[in-house]
Amino acid sequence: MTKREEQKMRKLDFQYHMRLLFPEPVNRHHFTLRCFPIDSERQKITNLNIQITPSHVGGTETDSFGNRCIYGVVEKPHTEFCVSVDGMAYVYGDAFQPVADAHKIGMFRYNTDLTKIGPTLDKLYKKLSAGTPEKEAITEKALRWMEAVHSCIKYVQGITQVTTTAEEAAVFGMGVCQDYAHILLALLRKEHIPSRYVVGMMTGEGASHAWVEVCDGKKWVGFDPTNNCMVDDQYICISHGRDARDCTINQGYFYGSPRQIQEINVVVEESRDD
Amino acid sequence: MAILSLEHSDQLYWLGRYSERVYTTIHEYEKRFDSLIELKEEDYNAFCKAQDIPNIYNSKDDFIQRYCFDENDTNSIYSNLIRAYDNAVVLREEIGSETLAYIQLAVYAMNKAKASQAPLIQLQKVVDNIVAFWGMVDDDIDNEHVRSIIKLGKRIERIDLYARMKMDPVRLRREMKRLNTRINRTGLKYNTMKLAHLNYLVEMSEIPNDIVVEEIESLFDDEERRTENA
Amino acid sequence: MVKEELYSYSDTVNELLARYGVRFGIYKNGTFKEQLFPFDMIPRKIGRDEFDYLERGLKQRVMALNEFIKDIYGDKKIIRDNVVPEEFVYMGSGYLAQCEGVRPPKDVFTHISGIDLVQAKDGEWYVLEDNLRIPSGASYPMIAREICRRSSPETFKKNAISDNRNYAKLLRKTMDHVNVGGHTVILTPGRYNAAYFEHSYLAEQTGAHLVTGNELVVENDNLFFKDYSGSKERVGAVYRRISDEYLDPMNFNPESVIGIPHIYDIYRKGNVALINAPGNGVADDKGIYYFVPDMVRYYLGEEPVLHNAPTYLPFYPKDMEYVLENFDSLVLKDVAEAGGYGVVFGSGMTGEEKDRFIAMLKAEPRRFIAQEVIDFLDIDIYENGEAVPRKADLRAFVLMADEPMVWKSGLTRFSRNPDSFIVNSSQGGGFKDTWVMEE
C-alpha cells in the first residue's frame, strides 16, 4: 500500500442520479441496474450509498463481465422510479487492470452487432491501416486511431440512439460518446486487437460517459475518443463489456405505460474532504 | 404434489362449460331439426331468442346448416366444440391423452357430420364422445381439483342453459343441488352470497330465469379472484 | 414379411395417431396450421451390434461436447492449446457472453442432445449434425411405438425388438438429476409452437407440469410456480422448450414476452436448473462440428468412435486448396444458416455461379464448410401400397444424468420426394419407428 500512495492519485466525490418518469402508472416493473463503480486496480470506492425507490424485492449479482448489478421488481403501480448512487473514489491515474490470461479475453477481439463494420468504416479502416508506421505498438496505434475517430464524427446529441451501430453513426457523421467508442472498437477489432467498451463517469460531465479500453498484451489501457485523450484519474469506471448493450445502465421490463422519460444527472468533482 | 396454475384452472372450467354447451345444444338442435323437417319456417327464431344469440339466419335450411356447422358463426355448435378443444388441447398433462382423445374424436365426428346428408347420425357420435369424455374425467383423473373444476363448469353451463331455455324447474333444482356439492371441491374462490341467492331463487314456485342467468354468470367475481392471485 | 404384415395395420395405426392428435405445427402464409406427421409402417431396423457401436460413439461424443462447453465458458484450455481457433467460438451464433463463468447444476450443459446420423451405402454411419439447443422429435417415435404395439401385438411377439418405452423415465431421471429442489416444469412458448404436441406429451409422460412464462415468477432469488389458489410453489428444474434468446428479457432479447424476467440471474446463482443449459449452442455450430473429433481426443484422450462426414474448413489453407481442386464433388454449407438453407452442391453450379461462389469463399473462408457428398443408404417406405426407396436419417437421443444414456430408438425421418435429401417435417417429410434389435 505504501507504494500505491506514492502514485498519482485523485480523490473524487461522485453522485449518479437517475429518474424514470412514466406518463401512466406501470406495475410489475422488473429492473437490472449497472451503475455502481466497484474496486479495481485503478480505483477504490468508499462511502458508497445506494438508494432505489419505490420499494422492491430483488438481489445483487456480478455479471459475466465482472460488473456489479442490482436487480429486482417493483410490483405496485408507480409513475416514478429513482436511483441515487453516491460515494467517493480514489483513482490512480497510472494504474491499469492487468490481463493474466490472454487466451481468455478472445471475446473482445471480435465485433458485435453494434460494432459491425460496413462500407463507410471499411474505407476509414483501409485509410488508417495504409498509414501504419513500421513497428507500431498497440497503444500507439490506438492513440493514432482515436484521433481519427474523434475527427470522423461530430459530437451532436439526439441524432443517434442506444441501438445505433458504429457503421450507422459513421454514415451520419454525428453521434455521442457511445458512438465514438463503438467506432473505435470496430476499427481495433478489425485487426483483432482486444478492446472493450467502458461506461463510467468523469469530472465535468453531466451524464454518464463511455470510452474504450485496449489490451496491450498485459493490461487494459483507457482511451476516450470523444475527448480525444487518454483516460486518467478524472475517470471513474462503472462497467465494461463488448459494447453498449453489455453495459446497459438500466434494463427495464414493465406493464402499463408504453413510454418512459429518463433523466440522468451525474456530478463528479474533486473531493474537498481530507 | 399437485399444483395447478390460474390459467389452467380457467381452461378446465371452460372445457367443462363448452363440452356441456355442445352436448345440450345438440339435443336441442336435434329436436328442432326433427320438427323443421316438415314444419314451419320461422320456428328457429324462438330457439335463437332462448339461447340469447342473434338470429342471423336467412331460412330454416340456413339455420340447420349454419347454427350447427358454420365455423365462422361464433355461436354455432361447431365453434363451441372448437372452443372446448382449444381448452382441452392445452391440458394434456392435467387430463391425460386418453381423456383428451375423446374431445379430438368429437371434433372429427363433427367434421364428418358437417359433410353428411344425414347429420343427426354423426352428431350422435359427437354426443357419444362427449359422454365418453365425461366418463373419463370421472374415472381417469386422480386430481380431485382438476376433476371437480371440469364438472363445476359443466354444472354451471347446464344451469345457465336450462334457465335460458326455461326448462322444467325440477331439472334446474337437481342441477343446483349437484353444483352445491361440487363447488367446494374445486379449490376455487366464489361469491358465497350469490350461491345462497341462487339456491333461494331455484326453490321459488315461479323461477325468475333471467335473474338465475345473471347470478350464475357472475358467481365467480373475476376481479376478486385475480387480485387474490396478483 | 414384416413389411407386408405391418402394412395391413396401417389404417389402424393412422387412426390411432389421429385419435391422439399426433401433430406438428407449421406456419403457412402467416397463419398457424397443424398437420399430422406422416408415419410409414416399415420400421428401420438396427442390429444389436450396430447399435452398441452407435451407443458407444454417441456417449463419447456427447461427453466431449459437454466438456467443451464447460471449458469455453470457463478456462478455455482448448483455445489456449490451439485445438479450436477462437474465431470459430466467438463468431458463431451459439456463443453467449452472458454464460461466461456460469456453472450449471452438476456441470451438465447437454441434458438432451439430438445427434443426426446417416448411413452410407457401405454401411458406415456418419454424424451430420449435433443438435444441443432444444432438439425435438422424441415424442413421435414414443407414441408411434405405443400405437404399433397395440395394433399388431403379434409383430412384437415374433421379433426381438428392444423396448423403447423408457424415454419418459430417462428424461425424468435427467431432470431430477439436476433439480435443485422443488417442482419440475416444462416451459413451452405456447400452443402455437410447432412442437406443442411434444411439449404437452412429454409433460404428461414425465409427470412434469407444462407451463408458459407467465405462470412462473422469480422472487427472493428463487423461481416459483403461481398456483391458482394463490400460493407459490418453488420450481427446481425447468426443461425449457424456448430458445436462449427468449428465455429472459432482462438478460437476453429485451423484446421477449414469453420468457421469465430474472430467471437467468437466479440460474447464475445456482438456484434453478435450466435444461438444456443456455449457451450450449456454442458447441453445435456448423463450424464447430469440424472440431468434434478433436474434442474427443483432447478431453477424453480417446479416438473418436463415430465419424463426421468428411469435412473441410476453407479457413485452413490446406483445406481451401482441396476444396478448390475438388469443388464439383463437394457440398458447401454456410455456417450461419440452418434448416437446409445455405446449402449448395458444387456440381449443381454453372461456371459463372461457381466463380462468384469461389470469390465469396476466398473473401470469407470462415463462413463456409465443405463436405463430401455421402452416398446415402436408402430405406423403403410405402407409397400407394408399394415399397419405394427414400433418403432417411436418424436422430439419436442422448440424455445426460450422472452419465450419458442413449435411448434405444430414435427418430427416423425420411424424405417423401425421391430426389430430395431434405427430411424435415416442415418440408413434408415423414417418420418411421426405429427398431433396435435384441440380437
Image: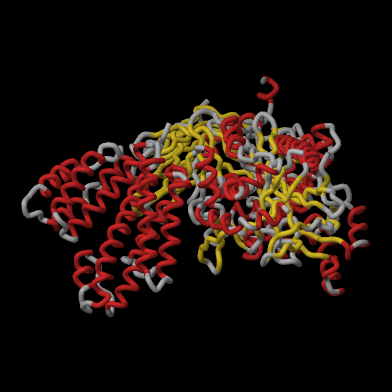
Query: Is C254 on the left or on the right of C67, as rendered?
Result: left
Which color scheme does this rendered protein use?
secondary structure
- Res. B80 image quadrant: bottom left
Q: Is residue A162 visible?
A: no
Residue B116: image location, x then y, percent: 41, 71
Specify the quadrant that holds the C terminus of chain C: top right
Q: Position of residue A59 (x, y in %)?
A: 48, 32
Q: Is residue C82 visible?
A: yes
The x and y percentages for residue B18 are 33, 55
- Residue depicted at x 55% and y 69%: C29
Q: How many marks?
A: 0
Q: Is residue C328 above or below residue A240?
A: below
Seen in the picture, residue A7 relative to B6 is either above or below; the reply is above
Residue extending farthest left = B205
| A3 versus A138 height, above or below | above
Rendered location of residue C148, percent (x, y): 61, 49
- Residue at image point 53% right, 27% down: A46
Front residue of B228/B213: it is B213
Residue A7 found in image quarter: top right
- Residue in the picture at 61% in, 34% down: C174
Nearer-the-camera pick, A24 or C220: C220
Q: Nearer the viewer, residue C285 or C380?
A: C380
Residue shown at the point (29%, 50%) measured from the top left: B154
